[in-house]
Image (cartoon, grey):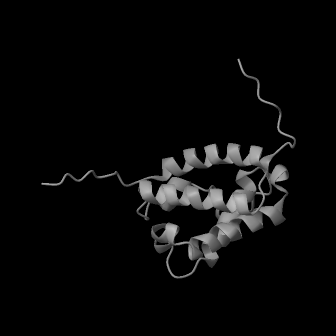
Amino acid sequence: MQIEEKPPFDTPFAWIGGEERVRALADRFYDLMDLEPAYRELRAAHGPSLDGARDKLFWFLCGWLGGPQHYQDRFGHPRLRMRHMPFSIGIQERDQWLACMDQAMGETGVPEALRARLRQSFFQTADWMVNQSAVIRKLP
């Protein structure tokens, strides 16, 4: 049996560095989405402005990581799947979201041990958000 070390902080929010670092992560995530062609489909799903989404991600991540519940204070329970149901989210969008977030975590200096834990948690959440099944097309 492998025993994991206790994380160096009580919450991921503290480990990442608090609100300033969470804001940097959310901002870099949306900057990358806007700049990188690899995230084209993900960007297209967000409409012309990313400002509202940028703030909502910051507010959500603060609480999700164990910090202040900014999102819940403004909107109530996140109900992620319900709130994302109007958007077409397939495997491609899921994978682009995860890649964009991983790149943002790397570029904003999220500690590698925390990044590995968050990568796993983000995958579980993003996979749960998928609402379009993959269609396999066969050539005639």
Count of labels in the image: 0
The vertical placement of 98 against 54, above or below, is: above
Residue drawn at the location 52% of the way across and 82% of the way down: 48
The quadrant the C terminus occupies is bottom left
Q: In which quarter of the image is residue 52?
A: bottom right
Instruction: Find the residue positioned furthest to the left.
Output: 140
Q: Give x and y (percent) for residue 27.
A: 70, 71
In the image, what residue occupies the spot 76% across and 67% down? Answer: 23
Asked whether 69 or 122 is in front, the reply is: 122
Whether residue 40 appears in this view of the structure is yes
**Place of residue 105 in the rendered image (x, y in percent of width and height, measured from the top left):** 70, 58
Residue 94, percent from left and from top: 49, 55
Q: Residue at x 65, y 71 (%)?
A: 54
- Which of the two residues, 81 or 1, is positioned nearer the viewer here? 1
Q: Is residue 120 above or below residue 131?
A: above
Left or right of 137 in this view: 53: right
Residue 66 appears left or right of 96: right
Q: Residue at x 63, y 55 (%)?
A: 77
Please state which of residues 38 and 60 is positioned toward the viewer in this rendering: 38
Above or below, 133 relative to 5: below
